[in-house]
Amino acid sequence: MDDFYAIRRLPPYVFAQVAEIVADARAQGREVTDLSMGNPDLPTPSSIVEVLREAVLDPASHRYSDSRGVQSLREAQARYYGRRFGVKVDPDRQVVATLGSKNAFANLATAITAPGDVVLVPNPSYPIHAFGFVMAGGVVRPIPTKADDGIFRAAERALRYCVPRPIAMVLNYPANPTTECASLDFYREAVRFAKKHDLFILSDLAYAEVYFGDPPPSILEVPGAMDVAIEFTSASKSFSMAGWRVGFAVGNERLIAAMTRVKAYLDYGSFAPIQHAAAVALDNAEDISAEVRAAYARRLDVLLDSFADAGWELPRPEASMFVWAKLPEGEGEDSLEFSKRMVREAGVALSPGTGFGEGGEGHVRIALVDDEAQIRAAARRIGEALRLKEAA
Ligand SMILES: Cc1ncc(COP(=O)(O)O)c(C=O)c1O
């Protein structure tokens, strides 16, 4: 029997595929260091956990909450945008709190996509950027990931030749998986382009606070961006709160209103104590994220040094919690085969680049989600596996 319509359009989720290989290896008694998924292992700050603990004790917090997020959380997000980006946002009409930014993206896709609508999505990209629209009945047309004119040239071609013409363009900087970053000048050009061509821009800024150089800008810093753009942020990486499922959309009022309508049918918002704790995290964003950054920066140094010692030179990312690594020369495998072999021979799980789209071939993504000792040991074992192959 044919599979369901939606399932035929959703390839098995990349992280689930890798998790299966890891589970098999572990079932055979092998130790595996899992650097495949961007699943932060750093604990949520105890002060934030304490806010949650106290709020849980109040029975009033056990009821359904507000699907667009409680007022105090939306206000905290508006204050954060003011402090961090110098952008004034209206917490009632320009902010919605979501069950993580992945859900937020899917909610928006559901809200704005008619069957067959075309959306411009980077390839490679974080899967929901494309599949949020596929699930909503839309059609995805790839654009490059690098934040330069190539995107606008590709988008212009799409605008000229796609029928129906595209309705929106996804941007994601710092980018997952490629770690690329965008400048404010690039965003200025993107807003100008979107206005000229009557496109919405959907900007994913999930790594707003995970950077090693200059802080990434928000597209909403561009004057007039609110006319065309909506931006997604998340507590997951910035505050090590991935399991809490707290994200936000901020921006264009029409898009926010559409999302809010869809969410009213789908959910009742996060558990209220989670929202109260997230508001406190946002009000302390600078301190919390400084610690998160310092931890990832230490790991990054160890990772780059120890992989170089193992014979695999990796590029230093400016931001995100990943290294986007070209497969070592002469391995002669695709990224999935290489990743499987690394689990088997080195006990290290990496994400194959093709899990993020065909444009990811030739690369693997390495996440900074274990401590320095584990990263060092993983690099050593990978080095041994690469030498084994060379010798064979
Ligand atoms: C670019 C990007 N957007 C969104 C998400 C999802 O984040 P959340 O936990 O807020 O759903 C991730 C998670 O890895 C991501 O890398």
Image (spheres, rainbow, N blue to C red):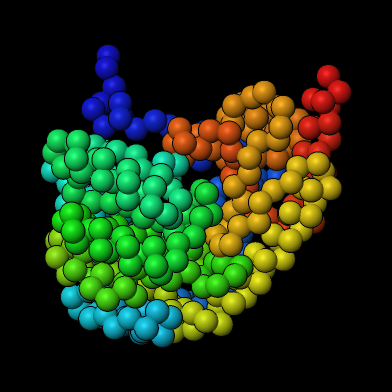
Displayed quadrant of residue 224:
bottom left
Q: Which residue does the image show at 67% across and 66% down from the upper left?
A: 297
In the image, what residue occupies the spot 37% across and 83% down?
86
* Residue 164 percent across, percent down from the top left: 13, 38
Q: Above or below — where is 308 with respect to 355?
A: below
Q: Can residue 80 be seen in this view?
A: no
Q: Where is residue 337 in the image (x, y as percent from the top left)?
A: 62, 26
Check the image and report above or below for 38 versus 14. Answer: below
Depth order, front residue of 233/57: 233
Against 95, is 365 above or below?
above
Give the residue at the far right of this rendering.
391
Q: Which of 51 and 280 is in front in this view?
A: 280
**Residue 140 located left or right of residue 372:** left
Placement of 162 over or under 247, stated as above or below: above
Quarter location, residue 298: bottom right
Q: Which quadrant would the C terminus be assigned to in this image?
A: top right
Q: Nearer the viewer, residue 46 or 116?
A: 116
* Front residue of 185 and 351: 185
**Residue at image location 27% in from the left, 14% down from the top:** 1
